[in-house]
């Protein structure tokens, strides 16, 4: 496992690229964006080091292209965990398994809430159109 630094505004990884690793945020803040650099860019999350945050874990777990872009919001330091490091990382720090599961669960919960809110808005719009 290697530590790496990124300067403010530097892209850590891009949406649609494949990179089988995750990052543990050691210092600073990272922005997670959909459609980064495009007119309809959306900040999905702002992750802070003091939260013990890992990001990019789905790229490692799923072996799929990135679903978002990660950008340093100020100078940051991360620990890069590759597929080769994955087992050793959790053997050395088993508590991180639960922390990452909790983070992923929180993200899934937030997405579910957003989806339900969108469904309600659509239903209300349809009902308004009918009347």
Image (cartoon, rainbow, N blue to C red):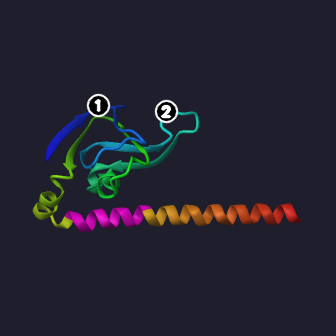
The image shows residue 107 at horizontal and vertical percentages of 42, 61
Looking at the rendered structure, the secondary structure element under dot 1 is loop
- Residue at 15 percent across and 53 percent down: it is 85
Vertically, is 94 above or below 40? below
Label 1 Cα neighbours within 10 Å, binned few <14 / some 14-19 / many ≥20: some
Label 2 Cα neighbours within 10 Å, binned few <14 / some 14-19 / many ≥20: few
Q: Nearer the viewer, residue 14 or 10?
A: 14
Looking at the rendered structure, the secondary structure element under dot 2 is loop
Vertically, is 58 above or below 41? below
Q: Looking at the image, is mark 1 or mark 2 nearer the viewer?
A: 2
Residue 118's tag is none
Per the rendered image, the range of residues in magenta is 96-107
Contact between labelled residues 2 and 1, with CB atoms less than 8 Å apart:
no
- Residue at 34 percent across and 62 percent down: it is 103
Distance from disc 1 to disc 2, alpha carbons, whole Å, reads 17 Å
The image shows residue 128 at horizontal and vertical percentages of 83, 63
The image shows residue 79 at horizontal and vertical percentages of 19, 46
- Residue at 39 percent across and 47 percent down: it is 65
Residue that badge 2 annotates? 37
Residue that badge 1 annotates? 7
| 80 sits left or right of 40 in the view | left
* Residue 20 is inside the magenta segment: no
Q: Nearer the viewer, residue 19 or 44?
A: 19
* Residue 99 is inside the magenta segment: yes
The image shows residue 44 at horizontal and vertical percentages of 47, 49
What type of secondary structure mainly makes up the magenta span? helix
Among numbered discs 1 and 2, the one appearing first in the sequence: 1
């Amino acid at each position: 496992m290697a530590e790496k630094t990124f300067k403010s505004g530097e892209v850590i990884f891009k949406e649609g690229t494949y990179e089988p690793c995750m990052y543990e945020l050691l210092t600073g803040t990272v922005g997670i964006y959909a459609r980064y650099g495009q007119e309809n860019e959306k900040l999905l999350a702002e992750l802070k080091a003091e939260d013990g945050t890992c990001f990019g874990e789905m790229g490692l777990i799923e072996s799929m292209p990135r679903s978002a872009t990660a950008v340093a919001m100020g100078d940051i330091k991360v620990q890069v965990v590759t597929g080769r490091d994955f087992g050793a990382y959790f053997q050395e720090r088993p508590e991180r398994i639960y922390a990452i599961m909790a983070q992923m669960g929180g993200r899934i919960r937030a997405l579910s809430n957003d989806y339900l809110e969108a469904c309600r808005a659509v239903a209300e719009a349809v009902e308004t159109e009918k009347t």
